[in-house]
């Protein structure tokens, strides 16, 4: 049985072995086949999938729960696209296309919610920064006034 061991996958993906095992344990990463001795044997598909997860986590700032939802929607969308292609030119095509659209809308909603959360955090930090600047200016003026007396 050909495949890569977890050490190789960790090096290529930039993740720790512990993280890879955890992603498998919670069902985020599909379980790889194992040797008779129980050693996991990963494929390039596993590495590509881990890169997809890492990208969504780092770029989008997704939590593990959001990652699971995002990956689930991605898997659903891929299946729906495949089903759509199989019925192309038939009466079922419209219904399959509606299903694709609904899944895309759900993915967009997940991203939109994340953006709203990020903007709220940004707004809070901007307010805090502005208040700190104002306090520094005020503190500087008070100090100058005290020094004159």
Image (cartoon, grey):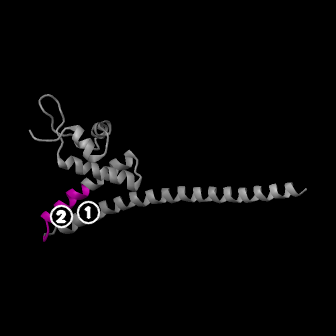
Q: How many neighbours does mark 2 have within 10 angstroms: few (below 14), some (14-19), or many (20 or more)?
A: many
Q: In the picture, residue 88 is in which quadrant?
A: bottom left
Q: In the picture, residue 101 is in which quadrant?
A: bottom left
Left-right relation of 8 to 58: left
Does the magenta-highlighted stretch encompass residue 81? yes
The extreme top residue here reads 37
The extreme front residue here reads 147
Residue at position x 26%, y 62% in the image: 99
Up/down of 136 relative to 40, above or below: below
Q: Main secondary structure of the magenta part?
A: helix
State the image coordinates of residue 45 (x, y, percent, origin top left): 19, 49
The extreme right residue here reads 149
Q: Which residue is mark 1?
A: 100
Foreground of the two, 81 or 99: 81
Disc 1 and disc 2 in contact, CB within 8 angstroms: yes
Report helix, strand or loop for mark 2: helix
Disc assigned to residue 4 = none
Q: Which residue is mark 2?
A: 84
Q: CA distance from mark 1 to mark 2?
A: 8 Å
Residue at position x 40%, y 51% in the image: 62
Foreground of the two, 42 or 116: 42
Q: Which residues are magenta?
A: 76-89
Q: Mark 2 or mark 1, which is nearer the start of the sequence? A: 2
């Amino acid at each position: 049985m050909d495949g890569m061991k977890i050490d190789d996958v960790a090096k290529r993906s930039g993740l720790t072995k512990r993280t890879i095992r955890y992603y498998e344990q919670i069902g985020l990463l599909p379980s790889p086949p194992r040797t008779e001795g129980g050693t996991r044997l990963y494929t390039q598909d596993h590495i590509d999938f881990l890169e997809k997860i890492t990208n969504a986590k780092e770029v989008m700032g997704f939590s593990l729960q959001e990652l699971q939802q995002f990956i689930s929607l991605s898997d659903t969308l891929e299946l729906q696209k495949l089903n759509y292609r199989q019925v192309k030119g038939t009466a079922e095509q419209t219904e399959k296309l509606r299903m694709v659209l609904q899944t895309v809308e759900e993915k967009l909603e997940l991203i939109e919610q994340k953006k709203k959360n990020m903007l709220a955090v940004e707004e809070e930090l901007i307010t805090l920064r502005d208040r700190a600047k104002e306090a520094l200016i005020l503190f500087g003026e008070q100090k100058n006034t005290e020094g004159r007396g």
